[in-house]
Image: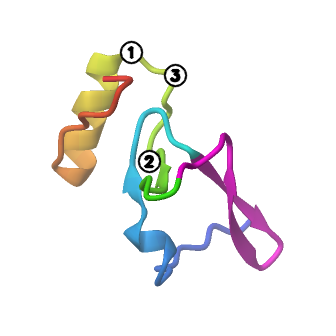
Amino acid sequence: EQEVLGIFQIGSRINHSCSPNTTRYFTGVRFEFRAVRTIEIGEEVTITYIDAFRPCRERQAFLWKHWRFSCHCDAC
């Protein structure tokens, strides 16, 4: 299986949350975002950049190491 990387104009603008309201799917050549719960009007669309099931301290360390930010979502 070949690994492919890309930058997506809309997808690259979606911020991280450890309790995201969407998830991403790759279906063949398509990249989709699907809501995992109701998203209220005006609510920011979020995805998780990491394994959100890890302990908070591990998530924070990974986010800082790879993206240089601290998460302040409800799960943290």
Q: In the picture provided, is 26 more to the left or to the right than 51?
A: right
67 with respect to 8 (left or right): left
Residue at image point 60% right, 73% down = 4
> Which x, y percent locates residue 20?
51, 41
Q: What's the CA distance linking mark 3 and mark 1?
A: 7 Å
Q: Is residue 16 magenta?
A: no
How far apart are labels 3 and 2 at the CA level? 12 Å
- CA separation, marks 1 and 2? 15 Å
> Dot 2: few (<14), some (14–19), or many (≥20) neighbours within 10 Å?
some
Q: Nearer the viewer, residue 7 or 17?
A: 17
Which residue type carries mark 3?
Answer: Phe
Q: Which label number is shown at residue 30?
A: none
Q: Of the residues shown, which amino acid type is indicated by label 1?
A: Pro
Q: Secondary structure at mark 2?
A: loop
Residue that mark 1 sits on: 55
Q: Which amino acid type is marked by label 2? A: Tyr
35 or 26: which is nearer to us? 35
Disc nearer the start of the sequence (1/2): 2
Image point 53% across, 73% down: which residue? 5
Q: Magenta stretch?
A: 22-40
Q: Residues within 10 Å of mark 3 (few under 14, many from 20)?
A: few
**Element type at mark 3:** loop
Location of mark 3 (residue): 53
> Which residue appears at 77% of the width and 79% of the height?
29
**Relative side of 13 to 4, left or right:** left
Location of residue 40 with respect to 8 vertically, above or below: above
Residue reaching furthest bottom?
Answer: 9
Q: Which residue is mark 2?
A: 49
Q: In front: 36, or 54?
A: 36
Quadrant for the C terminus, please: top left
Q: Percent x, y for residue 19?
A: 48, 33
| Circles 1 and 2: CB atoms closer than 8 Å | no
